[in-house]
Amino acid sequence: MEYNDIKTPQDLKRLNISELDGLCEYLRERIISVVEKNGGHLASNLGTVELTVALHFCFDCPCDKFLFDVGHQSYAHKILTERGEAFEGLRKNDGISGFPQPAESKYDAFIAGHASTSLSVALGLAEAAHRRGSDEQRAIAVIGDGALTGGMAYEALNAIGSEKLPVVIVLNDNNMSISKNVGAMNNYLTRLRVSKKYSRLKTEIKRAVSIIPIFGDGAIHLLEKGKKLLKRVVLSNKMFEAMGISYYGPFDGHNVREMIDVFTQIKSKNGPVLVHVLTEKGKGLKSAVTDPEHSHGISSVGAPRGNDFSDVIGEFLSFAAKTDERIMAVTAAMAIGTGLEKFSAEFPERFKDVGIAEEHAVTYCAALAAGGMKPYFAVYSTFLQRAYDQLLHDVCIGNFPVTFCVDRAGVVGADGITHQGVFDLSYLLPMPNMTVMCPTDGDELRDMLEYSLTFAAPLAIRYPKSYVTTRPHEPIVYGKWETMLSSKSKVFVLCAGGRALDIAFAAADEIKLNIINARFVKPLDKECLKEINKRCNIIVTVEDNVAQGGFGMSVLSYLNEIGKCAECAILAHGDGFIDDRDINSSLEKSGLTKENLIKIVKSLE
């Protein structure tokens, strides 16, 4: 059988174990070929090839539920589960998702895109199977050591250990999440890694000294006498066993035979088990092994590149921190993606990577601010959702001057449904004491950051990955908008962010408009709105956010309060999830285009 004929896990099981190494080579080459062309998560998927093959060889998916934490290491799984041909369309419209998606395949048990969720899902599925009388079904969660920096994983471990359900936890330990792993759990896993090295070293020493005449037996006796003490030092913290979860490992995650032996044995075990496997992120591709952080996620060949807002963040904070010792930069395992790589090198003591723990990061920043520091938390919009309670309870109630640099706001393209940043305005605007700003380009973001240095309250600055056009701007004045284009028209377009502004300017090439840069989404520029309400016939708001609870509804609510005179329309995303894999296509499908803006204006005239 040719390896490209392997369509299902059943096909895989018909191979001899001796043929599996060849299959792994094929899968690795296929992943590299497609990801280099389409973009996607490269290093993480290269590190889990053998592990995935062994799991499918030993277990019965989809009867047994496979759960890949975050889901960004599931490419081999997708190829082996009836999506080999479709894999060419990875992360493309009408192609397959870069993350597990049950709507896409029966082999994907649960949607994933955010970290640290797989253990809770595994326990829930195992409990449901038990209640249905399907006790032979296993829930198998593949979770990386990076995801174990997230607090939700420990809540689930606590619950799993108190049950006797068939949950198999595969701890994929590559000493990385996206950035280098940090924290006490990483240190603990390091000790477990050392344990395997200790065992090998002990065997080698024992073999060596045994051949020494006369002294050999005595040396072995001394080695055995010291073994217990050394083992206590190396394995002093049996955390998983203490929680009621049987621990096995660590094992070589790139040795298919060893993995098959291990998984075959643990199938007969009752209750929850954890199998600790050691893998190399980027395995099989030298550049990915050498630099797994930059190879974690790569862009497709020929993908257009704008000017990244994150570069402005990193440059500004690095410059400002030279003279302001209060400044601290915080990230949740995303130093490179959020632009903080330079800051981390120049100010290591004032840079904090908390791991995949956004909730902790937000409350930590609140406490830093309470203690007199000036914290900046750089975080993707989709991940800040995870810390909603901490934003409201720990930052806003205390009115602490934490600045949130909300990256990847708006539609994001290839990462799809789980990563869209179209909800942040709607969850930030209702929070008392929160100020929300939207820069339209890098120069304006730089001005906002300069303004933030003396701002003494919670502040969120939200922006997409990149910008294209740079325009002149007026100085930042709290709560004030700026007029970007003035005409004799009685149509006003209020724009929240650069994408909105680009749409309005494109429309202005064909119809007369007044264009307002609503750089403060909260508070609204009420004086400006009052004046516009008197002078105009039509007001259209434009935002790269869902309409519900967003900028447009905030404007409409205020106009109704003061007595609306103009016809109003809101141009925003609808009430639904966006699984489009292309930014321009996403905007078009939501009507965020110059053509639709012109159509709306003409319909209201």
Image (tube, rainbow, N blue to C red):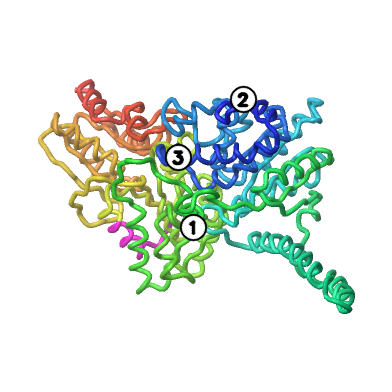
SS of the residue under disc 3: helix
Label 1: how many residues lie within 10 Å, few (<14), some (14-19) or many (20+)? few
Instruction: Please name which of the two marks, 3 or 2, marks the residue nearer to the observer.
Output: 3
Task: Tell me the quadrant of the picture where the C terminus can be found.
Answer: top left
Residue 88, label in figure: none
Which residue is at 52% across, 56% downward? 362
Q: Quadrant of residue 8?
A: top right
First in residue order: circle 1 vs circle 3 = 3
> Which of the two marks, 1 or 2, is nearer to us in this view?
1
Numbered badge on residue 35? 3
Q: How many marks?
A: 3
**Residue 106 numbered mark, or none:** 2
Of 107 and 161, the residue lying toward us: 107
Identify residue type, mark 3: Val
Secondary structure, mark 1, is helix
Q: Of callouts 3 and 2, which one flags the residue occurring earlier in the amino acid sequence?
A: 3
Q: 190 or 290: nearer the eye? A: 290
Instruction: Answer yes or no: is residue 330 visible.
Output: yes
**Magenta-drawn stretch contains 372:** no
Q: Which residue is mark 1?
A: 290
Find the magenta span and give its range. 446-458
